Amino acid sequence: MSAKKPLPPPPPLPRLGVESHAHLDDPRFLQDLDQVLSRAAAAGVAHLGQVFLGPEAWEKGKKRFPQNPAHPEVFFLLGIHPAEAHAFPPDVPDRIRALLLADPDASRVRALGEIGLDYHWKDCPPSVQKEMFRRQLRLARDLDLPVVIHCREATEDAFSLLRGEDFPGRPLLWHCFGGDSALAARIVDAGWHLSIPGPVTYPANADLRRAVASIPQDRLLVETDCPYLAPHPLRGRRNEPAFLGYTIAAMAEARNMDPAALWAACGENARRFFRLEDRTAARKAET
Ligand SMILES: [Zn+2]
């Protein structure tokens, strides 16, 4: 079985990077979460964004990520995924609001996400998705939190809804970007950030690599979206944050720059976007 084969070593990177989007509460990480997080730190991940899809997932999962100096510093994203919007009561954003205002762990939630529109899966009607998206955008604005967007086969509806909610110029990260240079330019022009996943390494994705080459350096982040979307040459395996080196290498090649420098720059962008230094400073002030 291929899972038994030793991994090719990822290129070494300084511990300055940020994994912007991981689903480490997925059952596929139940057995070895501690090792996954240790490998992430060894691979250069300083901070890691763990995504919880809904208040139950957050309440159940957050205790699995205590602060540990051998691990990246884990921060949280919390939101209702568009493809699952019909599975929650329409007022679940109010519940999220109440939790974020009352729970002592709420300071670890650095963004609402992933929220948006997904017309690929047909289970959830677009009208339900739009209403849930709109409510979560308003919640993010009220709570002064950045948003992380999931958009699949719904680009024009997402743009018009975001314009309607006055989001151009607000802190927004387009997660798992897979588009071309023209879409990247529209996102950049709206003042937003883009996070690049493992498929940038796949031989067929030359358009995505051209898009990555075109994005201003201060708007770029990197992510796994693990357990999905493992980069080449690990495609088809369970993805994990320690594999980000392959993704950065492909991005750096597309941009004709040094992988370690791009890794540090994307990390710096993520720390600024998610305001991670604020939190570190706040915690130091508490102690
Ligand atoms: Zn995701």
Image (cartoon, rainbow, N blue to C red):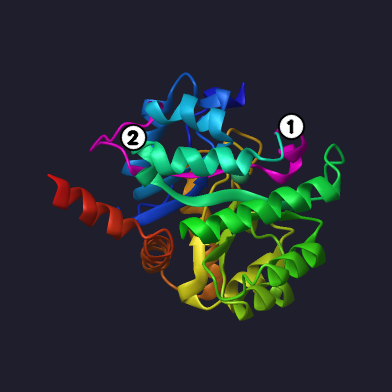
Instruction: Tell me if the residue at label 1 has its CB under 8 Å from ligand 1.
Output: no
Would you say residue 171 sits in the magenta stretch? no
Q: Which amino acid does label 1 sit on?
A: Ala
Q: Can residue 186 be seen in this view?
A: yes
Dot 1: within a 10 Å radius of its alpha carbon, few (fewer than 14), some, or many (20 or more) residues?
Answer: few
Picture quarter with the N terminus: top right
Residue at image mark 1 = 87
Task: Point out which mark residue 11 bears.
Answer: none
Tag in front: 1 or 2: 1
On screen, residue 18 versus residue 146, left or right, reads left
Bounds of the magenta segment? 64-88
Instruction: Tell me if the residue at label 2 has its CB under 8 Å from ligand 1.
Output: no
What residue sits 50% from the left and 75% below the top?
256
Task: Point out which mark residue 38 bears.
Answer: 2
Distance in Å between CA atoms under marks 1 and 2: 34 Å
Residue 168 at x, y percent in the picture: 62, 74
On screen, residue 167 versus residue 127, left or right, reads left
Residue 76 at x, y percent in the picture: 44, 43
Residue 134 at x, y percent in the picture: 69, 56
What residue sits 81% from the left and 63% below the top?
157
Dot 2: within a 10 Å radius of its alpha carbon, few (fewer than 14), some, or many (20 or more) residues?
Answer: some
What residue sits 56% from the left and 54% below the top?
139
Numbered disc 2: secondary structure: helix
Q: Which amino acid does label 2 sit on?
A: Ser
Q: Is residue 175 visible?
A: no
Given residues 102 and 69, the one toward you in this image is 102
Q: Which of marks 1 and 2 is nearer the N terminus?
A: 2
Picture quarter with the C terminus: top left
